[in-house]
Each structure stands twice: as structure tokens, then as C-alpha cells.
Amino acid sequence: MAYAYLFKYIIIGDTGVGKSCLLLQFTDKRFQPVHDLTIGVEFGARMITIDGKQIKLQIWDTAGQESFRSITRSYYRGAAGALLVYDITRRDTFNHLTTWLEDARQHSNSNMVIMLIGNKSDLESRREVKKEEGEAFAREHGLIFMETSAKTASNVEEAFINTAKEIYEKIQEGVFDINNEANGIKIGPQHAATNSTLSGSQGGQQAGGGCC
Amino acid sequence: MDAPQANGQLPSPTGNIIGSKSSATQLGACDGTPLQTIGISSPVYHVTEEFGDHRKVASFYSPAPCMTPLGLPGVMDAEGRVDESRLRMHIFKNGGVSLSERGQVWRFLFGMYPCSSTSLERPLLQEQLSVRYHAMKMKWHKLLPSTIRMRLNGTDAELVAAVQYFDARQERVQQQAEDQSDEVRERLSFLELQAQVLLERVTFDLEELQEAIRIIDKDVPRTDRDLPYYSAFGVGERRLMLQFTLKKRPSVEETRTEEFEEGEGLGNLLVLRDILITYAAFHPEVSYAQGMNDLCSRFLEVLDSEVDTYWSFSCYMEKFSKDFRADGLHRKIELEAALLKELDPQLHTHLITDNMESFTFCHRWLLLGFQREFEHYDALRLFEILSCDHLELISQKVDRARYQERIARRHSIEDKPVCESQAVNTEFTFELFICATILLDNRDALLRCRNDVQLIQFANSLQGTLDLNSTLKKAEEHFYNYCKRSTWDYMNSLCRARKNKEDHFLYQLRSFFS
């Protein structure tokens, strides 16, 4: 299917916080209570529309455990967006965020948009991390924040799409060099076709809402 | 080069009981008890096996396997010793053993029972291993009482029921322990004391262990839940349960009318949990890493005994724990790349270009022994074949012989030492050949892959689709061809190095490999 842009995402965070379930909910719109353990990396993709443009999200789901870190790290490179996930019912997964963030910033490009996600919001009675704490952490580190539930699908679409919007805005502002694939953005065939006379970076601004 | 799993090589637990036949005889003679009955009369460490085939939760210890002779022809002698190389060859030549033999074969193959042990010695060993394992488990129970029960967030009703069932079962086992005869109790308490003395000096890094338990508790509930072994309940278990409560074999009516106890099937996951935690506690240098749950689960399914799984898994990990460290697996991936370079330089060059994370897409295959690539029972069979190391042992034997010959030659002739390259790289295990075979079989698809995404997609597309028999056959061919070619190259270099006529025989020898 033709797309205007392709954004590469990574999903990171402690083991068992629901990374693979978030991805499955987003790509397949279903919840699998017992999801296979991710070994190394897995992969998913879905098309979304922003500003009338078809954008393909290519999402890399990584294993959470330390022993795989050296394998998964290599996939940080060339990601335009990252979903950093913790589990609101497990304080330790929130406490580890700093390590994850350092790791991500160190191994990815500096413009990468990071969305902080407090997952399992359906388990309100077992909550260990307050929403305000997540918000504060995000504010302090310049991240976007959202609480989601991969089980009820609450905010899952929004999490992936808002991240894409932020990346899209950065493209409009010219922050991302979209001709360099190492930034995790690729101009798609649709874009090239509809804006054949324009260069890539200008095309994004000109064609706003113009195509289906 | 290490000789893996040499005869009688068992980590720590065998102690002084095994080793020689005479020591067992002495032990038996000292109290006049016939050895056959020792160990299997103690109800503490096993649940009765009367309905063995239908039982759902693995017993703590099952006495049957140490007594039954192996059915494989020519593998076991009259006293019950196993000819290790024949066992390995049998597995390799026959493409694995049958389901009914697998459990017992694995107890030898992975080294829980030394092949040199006799059927008289094994019940003693079994008892010692049981007591030792139990003491190990009690040690972390005592130090971290809050972790004895699995931490659940209440969303997994099946598992909550399983935990309740498991607790009740532990109590029953405890009760049985108190009901046994004085003689048995005395013997066991001696073994317990021995185990405690041994464990006395062991210290834990409690923080590290808690972290490991936290991850184990996340992983165990999502391990092999689709397998019948871990699924809800079976008829036999229900009968067994009744047997406990009625203290007799239940009638058909009783079986029908009695309400089923919930959660038994998943109880095996809790057995798996205890094994993994005990392993992590006593192997802090390895601890727990994801993927071990999948591996250990195989042992549990096949052996269906907590104690035997623990020791077999530990033996296996002695050799393979490095795979669970980043550097160990990287090394394996590097070797895979090196092997492919030998077998298909063009494909190798394609896969190491800039936008591919060279060979990391094989990571899961090599970590889990292709567990998700083949159908479950085929994957078990492959694991067994890979673990028998038959081809590797042969090539190592040849390598050792060559080395000795070289040393002998150096001593006899005052020849200037020839710098000899290694003929065959013995680090290329059969597992790497299986992996290479999969790559070569999909050569065209791989050559079409232009980046990581396509490679990962390719790797994922293979899940559950591969045919084991044809893969094995091709891998074996690749293995032999590689050995043949390397040997020819090696002979060729020898021929070039010595041009005098006495070495005519070298030329002839070389021709055998062309």
C-alpha cells in the first residue's frame, strides 16, 4: 500500500509491562492475555492517517530483559519515535525509567520523539504509580505522557498516533532531515507520486490535507 | 577443546554415592537392606505413580525411571550401565528416540545419571538428589519467605486457582513426610543433614535474587500455556486427588461424582517456577535470563519430575549458560556467520552489508534451539539430537588423534615443525549447521531481503513451518561436505609443503576426499 511517510518506532521498557500487547492491540485490535515472551525483537506495522497523509508506522517491539539489551540496542538506531512503557501496578518498572531513557538517548538520534506510557490503566485497584508521578516524570524529561490499557484498548490508538503527530510536526518544522533514513523516516511512494515536482521536505508542508 | 559430558561427570550432587559399584554394595551391606528397595520406599519425595500416565502435576520425584532398563538395543549392560557413545549414536542415527523412552534417555543424555552408574546405584543417587534439591529450595524459602508464593496481580484466574491448588498439594506432601516409617526417616534425616552442611556456606545476594524472581514471575505464566502439559485438568489427576482424600483407589462412581479441583494443570507452571528460582539462587553467576523458562519447560514436560528436571537442567546449563550472556550469544552468531562464509560466500556477503544487523535475526533460533520454528514435538526431537553431540564428538576425537600424532612425530623425527592450520573448525556445531541449512534453503528469499525489517519478517515467517526430517538430512550433508572439503584443503596444503616422493601416500590420501 502506498504511503507518504514511513516512521520507525521502537517500544522499550521492563519485561512484562505490556509492550507486545500494546503493539498487538494497535496492529490487530485484539488483546492476548497470555502473550509469548519476546526474545530479541519482534515487529509490527500499521497505516495511519495524519493531516490527510497516509503514514506507515513500522514498530519494533523489543525484549525487556537486560540479557538481550545488546541485541535490542542495535535497533534503537534509526528510530523516529519511541514508546517507553511502564506498568502502573508495578513501582519497580517506573523506577527503572531513568535507565531506559538514558539508554535510548544514548543509542538513538537526538530528535527521537519519546512517549512515556503508563500501561495497565484498567487495573486501577492495583495501581502503585500515580498518574501525577508519570506526568511529572514526563515533564521533567521532556516526554509526552499517556496512560493506556492494552486490554481495554483505552488510549492505545492515541499513544501511537500522537507520537506520529509529534514526529510529523517536527518534519514540518524542518527538525528532521527526512532524506537521511538514519532518522527513522522514509519518504514513501505516495509522497513521491503526489509531489513529484517538489523536493521531499517542502512536499510535506505544501500538500497538507490535499490528498486522500 | 573440552570433551563435553564425559562419563560420570555430574556437577556436585553425586558425591560419594556413585563413582563405583563397590561403594553402593557396601552401603547396602551395612544395614542388610537389599539395595533395590532403598529410596523408592520413601513417600516424602514422590507421589504414587499408579495413575502415572494421567497425572497432571509433575511429582517432586518419580522413582520409576531409575529402575526401568533402557529399551534401546545394545545401549545398557546387564548391570544397567549405559554405553554413552552408543546412546549418542543411537539418538543421532534414529533421529531421536520415541516419546515413551525420551524421559529415561534424557536422564542419561544430559548427565543427571552418570552413564557409569548401575541400576542398583541409581535409586540411591536419586534419593540423594531429591534431598539435596529439597534442602536448596528450603534455603531460599527461608531467606525470602515472601517469595514462596508467586506474585500475581489477580487478572489470571486460572493461575490464581493453580496457586491455591499448589499450596494444598505442598501441605499434602508435608503430611506424607510425617507419616513415614522411622527407618526411612532416619536415613533421610542423615541425607538432609549432609545436604545442609553442604549448603551452609552458600550465601545469596538477596537483592539480585529478588530481581530474578520478579522476572521469573513475569515469564512463567506465559510459558508454553498452549501445551497440553500445562493446560487445565485431566481425568487421572482427578482420580489421584480422590485417592488422596479417600485413601483408597476411587471407584468409577466416586470419580464421576466428585467435583474437580481447580487449577491442577497449571500447577506445572508453579513447579517450573520453583526450579528456575532454585537454579537462579544457586547459580548467581548465571541467575535467570529470559529463554531459560522455555528451555527448562522442555525438561519438565519430558521428565515430569521436579527434582530430575532441576538436575538435568543444571547439567545442561553447565555447557550452555554462556548462551544467555550477551557475549556468549554474540560468539555463537559470529560462528554462524563464519560457517555460512565457508558454505556460501555470496549469501554471507549479502547478509553482512551495512543495513543488516548481521545475523541477529538468527538470535532466537540459536537461543531456543529453533523451538518456535518447528512443530513442538519435532522441536523436542531436534533438541535431543542436537544435545547428543554425536558428530561433534567424532570430529573432536579425530582432532585429538591428529594432535597426538603430531606430538609423536615431533618427538621421533627431527623435522622442522610445520605450521599446520586446523583442518576442521570444531566450533562449528551441528546446531550451527542446522541454522545454516535453514538459511541456504531460503537463499533466494534472503538475497531479496534489503534491510533488517525484511530479515526479521523473513525470520518470523518461518515460525512453525519447517520440516525437521528434510532439514536434518540436508544439515548432515552440509556437515559431511564441509568436513570433506576442509580435509581435502588440509591434505592439499600438506602435499604442497612436502614435495619429496615418500609422501606419495599423502597424495593418495588426498584423493579420498576429492
Image (spheres, helix red, strand yellow):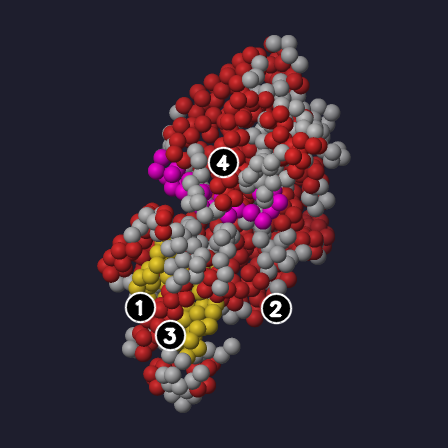
Q: Which residue is mark 4?
A: B164
| Residue segment shown in magenta | B206-230
Q: Amino acid at mark 3?
A: Asn
**Residue found farthest to the bottom:** A197
Q: Is residue B127 visible?
A: yes
- Percent from the top left, x then y, of residue A209? 38, 83
- Do circles 3 and 1 both sit on a common chain? yes
Circle 4 packing at 10 Å, graded few (<14), some (14-19), many (20+), is: some
Residue named by callout 3: A180
x and y, in percent, of residue A79 in the image: 38, 66
Marking on residue B329: none
Picture coordinates of residue B463, whole percent (x, y): 59, 58
Q: Amino acid at mark 4?
A: Gln
Indicate which disc, 4 or 2, sits on the residue closer to the N terminus: 4
Q: Amino acid at mark 1?
A: Asn
> How far is mark 2 from mark 3, CA to CA?
29 Å
Q: Secondary structure at mark 3?
A: loop
Q: Earlier in the sequence, mark 3 or mark 1?
A: 1
The reply to whether callout 4 and callout 2 are in contact (CB within 8 Å) is no
Look at the image and say whether residue B212 sits in the magenta stretch.
yes
Compared to residue A134, the image places residue B292 above or below, namely above
Is residue A58 shown above or below B414? below
Residue of label 1: A111
Check if mark 4 and mark 1 are on a common chain.
Answer: no
Report the amino acid beneath label 2: Asp
SS type, badge 2: helix
A49 relative position to B65: left or right = left
